Amino acid sequence: MTFLPIVNRELRVASRRRGTYWSRCTTAALAIVGGLLIYLANWDQASHVIGGDLFGLVSAGAFVYCLFTGVRSTADCLSEEKREGTLGLLFLTDLKGYDVVGGKLVATSLNAFYGLLAILPVLAIPLLMGGVTNGEFWRMALVLANTFFFSLAAGMLMSSLCKSPRSAMAATFLFLLGSSLGLLIAATSISLISESQDLTHLCNLFNPGCALTLVDDASFKRDAETFWTSSGIIHGSAWLFLVLASVIVPRSWQDHSTGARGGRWRENWRRWNFGNDADRIAFRRQLLGVNAFFWLAGRARLKPIFVWAALAGIGCLYGWGVIENGHSWNDSPIYIITTLTLNSMLKLWVASEAGRRMGEDRKLGSLELILSTPLSVREIIRGQMLALRRQFLGPTLAVVLVEFIFLLASLNTRGDRSDGAALVTWWAATNVMLVADMLALSAVAMWVGLSTRNPNRTTGITVIRILALPLVLGFTTLLLLEIFASATGTPFDPGWEFVFALWLLPGIFADLFFGLRAWRRLHHDFREVAAQRFAPRPSLWRRIFGPRAARGPYAGF
């Protein structure tokens, strides 16, 4: 029998996919463009200074990419097989748990691994410029590869334990965030309240970012033992996760009796989420009287409570800051950070929630059944929007009110009228962008969830189009203008109005372009896309430049 037969098969399949080649080309192109911008921004400095800055920035971006790649690549690979009922079929053969885990690991992480390989040549360019030694480059490559393997293994373990895609991806993200940022905060807190450094050192050893801080020659010579110990612990933990996943997988696909205690917990959770029989009947009549799809998408009563609970958690953190720091905490920078945190949380939550129902129903074939009822496409879309409004309207109004209070508090502490005008303008634009982004995210997420082959990518695609793309465009424009001013010798000192416009205008344009385009496609191509569940999607080149008949409802981006 062939050793790891699934790995052999998946490598052959991946070699025939276009995405295998496009992914590494795209990653390398982004790294090259980013490095070029960094070089142009510092072209008048010494080459070794530019090389050090380039190495540091590219390394930081690559580390974040490696740390969270498990959320996108492996967090849902085994849980998806469980939901579709195909995982048990694999174990009817001679396959073992490590065969399935190894095959899924290779199949889902190959494109991400090629992306990492594409970054390394860009990371080696500073070697030619000076400021970076061979040892620093190879230690950084080791840290990135180690972190990449750790993230993938953590995703495999969470996927073997969970069945829901949201649970698996959320558990993987929280675990990786806790093992990096959480351990860093814990180590810092322990060092402040305790004189013993043993526990602080232990937290640092289990942190994937510990070895990253010891890459440079000076730090490595000072504490080489910590570098190798931390790297060994992270690498050993990754293998431990894979071994645990291999042991869990052959047993996780079977249905087990929950027992009396587990049955009670499940029944209590169902009662809390949906209400008792009388409450469900009354709530169903209320929502069905408005819209049938509204009841289907919004029948879980706890969804709005979860949003309120998250806002309350942020409020508790803010209150803790006030207690610890007193009046110094009530300042405009803290208000701005809190505002951005609240707005970002709501936007990301909307992007995640809006496309989930469409994507899952289309993948399971439920949308085809719904479309066979008297419900029209317009009623389905309206029902989904009503469910989103029920979940997010109240929290959004509360956030706007809190931010208005922050504005009044900032104006009371500012005597300069120009600062007051800037604060009022920023507050008004922030709230306008909050509403516009949430509406655009809702439309784009519904369309992407309906049209994409993998519903788990809906949130990422939506966030990139509506939130990330305008920021990248504005930052790149500002950087190019600074480069041009430095090359021509002209002074470049943009005021807050110019920087504000670079943030606001691309965001409004992205909301209008992608939001209205997605809204139009939802109303015109909904039935056609929902019925083409198994039809192959045309390539990006054909969708943009091909004839309309070949492009179909997927035309454009």
Image: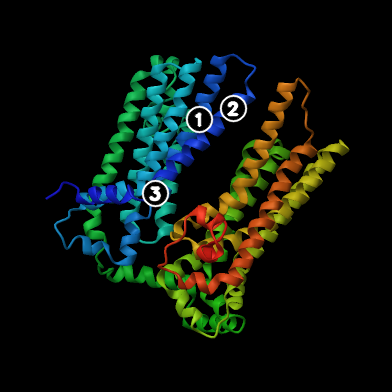
Category of crowding for the residue at label 2, using alpha-carbon neighbours closer than 10 angstroms: few (below 14), some (14–19), many (at least 20): some
| Amino acid type indicated by mark 2 | Ile
| Amino acid type indicated by mark 3 | Ser
Please report whichever mark, 1 or 2, sits nearer to the chain's N-terminal start.
2
Mark sitting on residue 58: 1
List x then y, in percent, for residue 418.
86, 37
State the residue lying farthest toward the front.
Answer: 547
Viewer-proximal residue among 384 and 111: 111
Mark sitting on residue 73: 3
Q: Circle 3 — which element?
A: helix
List x then y, in percent, for residue 327.
71, 38
Q: Quadrant of residue 82?
A: bottom left
List x then y, in percent, for residue 399.
68, 55
Q: Are marks 1 and 2 in contact (CB under 8 Å)?
A: yes
Tag 2 residue? 38
Q: Residue at x 36, y 28 (%)?
A: 142
Q: Nearer the viewer, mark 2 or mark 3?
A: 2
Separation (CA) of disc 3 from disc 1:
21 Å
Q: Quadrant of the C terminus?
A: bottom right
In the rendered image, the vertical position of residue 291 relative to residue 154, given as above or below: below
Residue 245 can be seen in this image: no
Mark sitting on residue 8: none
State the residue lying farthest toward the right.
Answer: 417
State the residue lying farthest toward the left.
Answer: 1
